Image: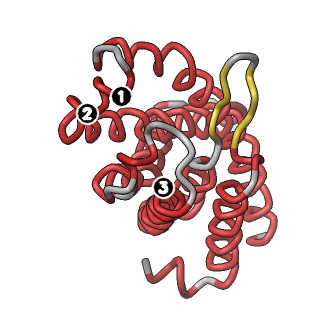
Amino acid sequence: MKKVFKNPRNLAFLGLMLGITIILDMTPLGMIPLGAISATIIHIPTIITGIVLGPAAGLIMGTALGFVGWIHALTRPATILDPFFMNPLISVLPRIFIGVIAYFVYLGVTKLIEKKSVKSAVSTFIGGMAGSITNTILVFLMLYLIYAKELVEKAGMSFGVILVSVITTNAIAEAIISGLITMTVASAYFRYAKTQKT
């Protein structure tokens, strides 16, 4: 935690990622159209922050992301899920872990791969996917634990069908996009940071 706030470059990066998160929430830029579906990318700055700056920064960004989503649900509800996201246990709590888990998955994969030429690309890609999957799993876990009956009534289908539908459409696309963007940005940041040390 101290490392994040004592290093001006890290603090600037954290502020930049938070600013991007707010912009993605306030504009259509937070959604990527993929034919009949749209993949959200608003959680990607949190994933990148966790991988680049570590779990403490990831936790800070995840909490900020959660509150951004909570405020969105309260002030600009647009989908059938937004009323559920007015509960911080749905909108905030799951997001706290996105950057943290992304970091530890990234770290674990980094230790497993010996080939330096692909280590950064593969580990950041898998870490990015893990962060996105964490978001999906934890949000739906909390929805199931708290609002399963209400969600089934609103959607007109069983919770299992809803979950399979989300996984086979948005979740897979979002995980791949998260992996690709995280790999691109995080790898570039690591290369830049390395040049600053030499």
Front position in the image: 103 or 22: 22
Q: CA distance from mark 2 to mark 3?
A: 17 Å
Residue 85 seen in this snapshot: yes
Q: Quadrant of residue 19?
A: bottom right
Quadrant in which the N terminus appears:
bottom left
- Residue at 69% from the left image edge and 40% from the top image edge: 183
Which element carries disc 2, helix, strand or loop?
helix
Q: Of the residues shown, which amino acid type is indicated by label 1?
A: Lys
Instruction: Residue at 55% x, 50% y: name it.
Output: 47
* Residue located 53% across and 51% down the image: 77
Q: Is residue 9 left or right of residue 126?
A: right
Task: Determine the residue positioned at 45% across, 33% down.
Answer: 133
Residue neighbourhood size for the residue with mark 3, other residues' Cα within 10 Å, grouped as few (<14), some (14–19), many (≥20): many
Q: Are marks 2 and 1 in contact (CB under 8 Å)?
A: yes
Determine which of the numbered discs, if any, sits on residue 48 in the image. none
Residue picked out by circle 3: 73
Give the residue type that dot 3 points to.
Answer: Ala
Could you tell which of marks 3 and 1 lies nearer the N-terminus? Answer: 3
Mark 2 / mark 3, whichever is N-terminal? 3
Question: For the residue labelled by badge 3, is the local secondary structure a helix, a strand or a loop?
Answer: helix
| Residue nearer the viewer, 168 or 97 | 168
Label 1: state its secondary structure.
helix
Mark 1, residue position: 154
Q: In this view of the protein, which residue sits in the foreground, 140 or 191? A: 140
Q: Is residue 108 above or below residue 74?
A: above
Label 3 to label 1, Cα distance in Å?
17 Å
Q: Is residue 128 left or right of residue 167?
A: right
Residue beneath disc 2? 150
